[in-house]
Amino acid sequence: LAKTTQPISMDSYEGQEVNITCSHNNIATNDYITWYQQFPSQGPRFIIQGYKTKVTNEVASLFIPADRKSSTLSLPRVSLSDTAVYYCLVAPFNDYKLSFGAGTTVTVRA
Amino acid sequence: DAGITQSPRHKVTETGTPVTLRCHQTENHRYMYWYRQDPGHGLRLIHYSYGVKDTDKGEVSDGYSVSRSKTEDFLLTLESATSSQTSVYFCAISDGQGHDGYEQYFGPGTRLTVT
């Protein structure tokens, strides 16, 4: 499994864009990059996944450079309710065991 | 929300007693997982199942066993509970098909306290 490294915590203010960068230097050719969000007292929730370039959905955008050794989750115009832990995971092809690290605690302030 | 329930939601038990946690799904998903979450350790995989009667160990399987006799139910058993097993336990499911298989749906969690 490719090891991931992401910041332990980030602070932001309402209305700002939050970018969380995850490093995965030893990602394999067929690995997929997946991000989850976890609110206090709840299980994690899938946000977005991608293989390369850019993926966007109603919640976030995911930017993956050509070398795929890192990825950046972008949360546009955050609100207080976006305060959560965000996990970056690298999923091996056809292997559905996911390894959650400690994640990044994002705190949004008014 | 995906149809996943966990029971019980809260349990207090004594050291040395057996405990079984149940995860039930109504999505007919192939994969089911048990995780534990502790402060400072994030989410760690205990066991998972890739079909009826097909299970495998995760990274923290010692002291735990699982069973899956039908698609919808995945049981986690602590044979003899210890205080180190005090934790929040999450069940998750995924359909295990292609890239959509990386999307896991989590249950509400079970808070277990071993005294």
Image: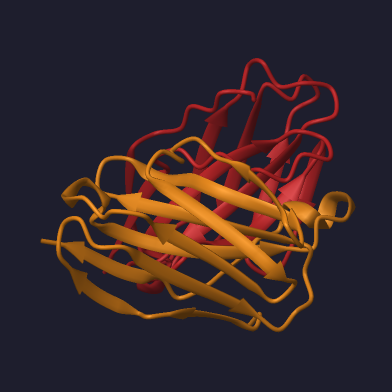
**Which quarter of the figure has residue B113?**
bottom left
B33 over B29 or under it: above or below: above
**Which quarter of the figure has residue A28?**
top right
Q: Position of residue B54 (x, y in %)?
A: 74, 52
Q: Which chain is orange in the rendering?
A: B
Task: Please give left or right for residue B39 compared with residue A56 in the image.
Answer: left
Task: Please give left or right for residue A30 compared with residue A6 in the image.
Answer: right
Q: Position of residue B1 (x, y in %)?
A: 63, 83
Which sits in the foreground, B99 or B6? B6
Identify the hue of chain A.
Answer: red
Q: Position of residue B61 (x, y in %)?
A: 46, 41
Q: Position of residue B4 (x, y in %)?
A: 59, 79
**Which quarter of the figure has residue A51?**
top right
Task: Please give left or right for residue A31 compared with residue A25 in the image.
Answer: right
Q: Which residue is the extreme one toward the top?
A: A26
Q: Quadrant of the C terminus of chain A?
A: bottom left
Q: Which residue is the extreme one toward the right?
A: B98
Q: Residue at x 32, y 61 (%)?
A: B88
